[in-house]
């Protein structure tokens, strides 16, 4: 059985186009907030924080080189995949931040977004 895999940009990443500045991902920030709100639940899925530059080998290995945008929740087989998940070969995944937040609540018991 495979677990859900959540891939995020590492907070405080740098961008070679903006030397000397550090950034957060605006789409990943709400997910990071949810993870921080209930850290004991983080062990229910695999979470990887990746550097900004592409190619992002972890994402390429998990999906492919055309789907390197983050955040992404790659769905394992411990829970049924929702009908609205994207499909790539035998992989099911979700890239919409709000939907990822919903699925973290449904599949892993995190608090729901009100």
Image (cartoon, rainbow, N blue to C red):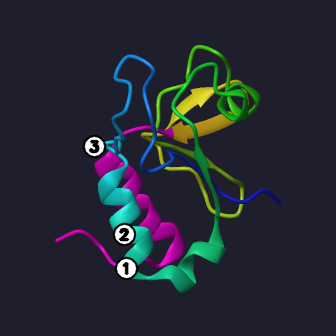
> Judging from the image, what secondary structure is the residue with disc 1 in?
helix
Q: Which residue is mark 1?
A: 37
Judge left or right: residue 94 versus residue 34: right
Label 1 Cα neighbours within 10 Å, binned few <14 / some 14-19 / many ≥20: few
Is 37 above or below relative to 89? Answer: below
- At x 36%, y 41%, the residue is 22
Dot 3 corresponds to which residue? Answer: 26
Determine which quarter of the picture holds residue 17: top left
Distance in Å between CA atoms under marks 2 and 3: 14 Å
What secondary structure is found at the residue carrying circle 3?
loop
Please name the residue shown 42% across and 48% down the image. 12
Relative depth, front residue between 73 and 107: 73
Quick one: label 2 or label 3, which is nearer the N terminus? 3
User: On the image, numbered disc 2 is attached to which residue?
Assistant: 34
Mark-to-mark CA distance, 1 and 2 = 5 Å
Determine the secondary structure under disc 2: helix
Which x, y percent locates residue 81?
A: 57, 50
Task: Please tell me which residue is depicted at 64% across the width and 27% down the height of the picture.
Answer: 56
Most extreme residue toward the right is 1
Give me the C-alpha separation between circle 1 and circle 3.
18 Å
Figure check: 14 above or below 104? above
Q: Is residue 25 above or below residue 60?
A: below
Kindly indicate whether the residue at mark 2 contacts the one at mark 1 (C-beta within 8 angstroms): yes
Image quarter of residue 59: top right
Magenta residues span 94-114
Residue occupying the point 70% across, 25% down = 60
Looking at the picture, how far across and down is residue 93, in whole percent? 55, 39
């Amino acid at each position: 059985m495979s677990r859900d895999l959540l891939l995020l940009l590492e907070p405080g990443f740098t961008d070679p186009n903006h030397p000397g500045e550090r950034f957060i991902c605006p789409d990943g920030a709400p997910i990071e907030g949810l993870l921080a709100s209930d850290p004991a639940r983080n062990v229910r899925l695999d979470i990887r924080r990746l550097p900004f530059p592409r190619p992002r080998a972890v994402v390429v290995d998990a999906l492919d080189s055309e789907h390197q945008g983050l955040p992404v929740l790659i769905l394992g087989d411990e829970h049924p995949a929702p009908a609205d998940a994207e499909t790539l070969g035998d992989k099911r995944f979700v890239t919409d931040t709000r939907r990822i937040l919903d699925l973290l609540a449904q599949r892993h018991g995190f608090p729901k977004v009100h």
